[in-house]
Image: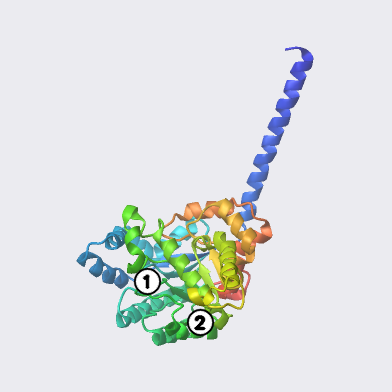
Amino acid sequence: MDTIGRRKFLAGSAALLASAAAGARAQQAAVPQVKAQRLIAVEEAFAPPRYFEEYLKIARRIDTPVSRYLKMYYEKPAVVRQLSDFDVRLADMDEYAVDMEVVSITAPGVQAFGAELGSELAMLANDMLAEQVAARPTRFAGLAAVAPQSPDAAAREIERAMTTLGLSGVIINSHTHGAFLDDPGYAPIFEAAVAFDAPLYLHPTFPPDAMLEPYNDYGMMGALWGFQAECSLHAVRMIMSGVFDRYPRLRVVLGHMGEGIPYWLGRLDNRYQNIRRRGGFDALGITPLQRLPSEYFQSNFYLSTSGMNDHAVLNYCVERLGAERVMFAIDYPYERTEEAVTFIRTSSLTPEQLSRVTHLNAQALFHIAPADHPSAQG
């Protein structure tokens, strides 16, 4: 190699090395910036010991894909400890610098039981959760379980949870014995949620019997696919039935980046308008809405990242709906805290967007005190 060629080679190598070093420094600088963000995880599961006992009574009596799915988790002492022991949970949070969790009863919730047992288990879970929140108010907030099997009792429990117990919202594990919340009989639940400013976290469950059979193959009945299919159906039923025209102040949270609905919003509007133009509302039983379907999703729904540690999906949801509609979640203990935290810490969101996703949205929606507020100092 001649002298000029050698010089060009060395100069080029030096430039490449300098560029790589600058990139590495930039990446390292980004991590502390993200670590400084308060981290509130909003879909974190728990249940009292009796909850597992009641479900195992059913699961051991009948052999179905769903019962085998439940036994896969609820017969494992380690999983039960993670779900019921808050000291175990707290150690996991501390290890990965999760500042706070919004905790709620694990799926399938209390809805598989009769109205009396379901209501009893909901109150038991809420009392346990409220005790933990009161003991560690800077680390935990809670969403109340209710039993829609008895809508009036569920409404009373929302009032108790949001006043006496000091919880931050409500979780409903989707359909109740095959009935969805668009049923007018559930009106007391919506009325109480609006009256007591209780956000409603709509968490998936197994598809109802009427649609379950095709999901029983290949392990598809649960989180692999059935949960998403069931919960997205539920949310769209709520929109299309006019729930948000009747309760415009109702706020609903969907996990798992919106259960696939953000990708489908344009299609919902397109088909709705197409059917309206063709005069097909009466023939197809469509409820005339005051707005387009996507507009309700953009104004009444929030998303969490639970179990969806995919930067491309996060970026799409933030761009489609705005950073003010997305919240960080882990889906503990079914997902690994380390993976979820690494995912959000390495995102390409702007500092302002990141602040919203990691904590500001959760603080506003669930009435959680800011970290610098005296009530958050312990």
Q: Earlier in the sequence, mark 1 or mark 2?
A: 1
Work out whether 158 lies above or below 347.
Answer: below
Q: Quadrant of residue 54?
A: bottom left
Q: Position of residue 127 (x, y in %)?
A: 40, 79
In the rendered structure, the answer to whether residue 98 lies left or right of residue 17 reads left
The dot on residue 239 is: none
Which residue position is annotated with label 2?
193
Q: Nearer the viewer, residue 240 or 115?
A: 240
The quarter in which the C terminus is drawn is: bottom right
- Characterize the local packing of mark 1: few (<14), some (14-19) or many (20 or more) Cα atoms within 10 angstroms: many
Say whether marks 1 and 2 touch (CB < 8 Å).
no
Q: CA distance from mark 1 to mark 2?
A: 18 Å
In the rendered structure, the answer to whether residue 283 lies left or right of residue 216 reads right
The quarter in which the N terminus is drawn is: top right
Judged from the image, the secondary structure of the residue bearing numbered disc 1 is loop
Which residue position is annotated with label 1?
109
Residue 374 visible, this orientation: yes
Q: Quadrant of residue 21?
A: top right
Residue 141 visible, this orientation: no
Q: Position of residue 169 (x, y in %)?
A: 50, 76
- Name the amino acid, label 2: Ala
- Characterize the local packing of mark 2: few (<14), some (14-19) or many (20 or more) Cα atoms within 10 angstroms: many
Q: Residue at (70%, 26%) from the top-left corner?
A: 13
Judged from the image, the secondary structure of the residue bearing numbered disc 2 is helix
Q: Position of residue 27 (x, y in %)?
A: 64, 45
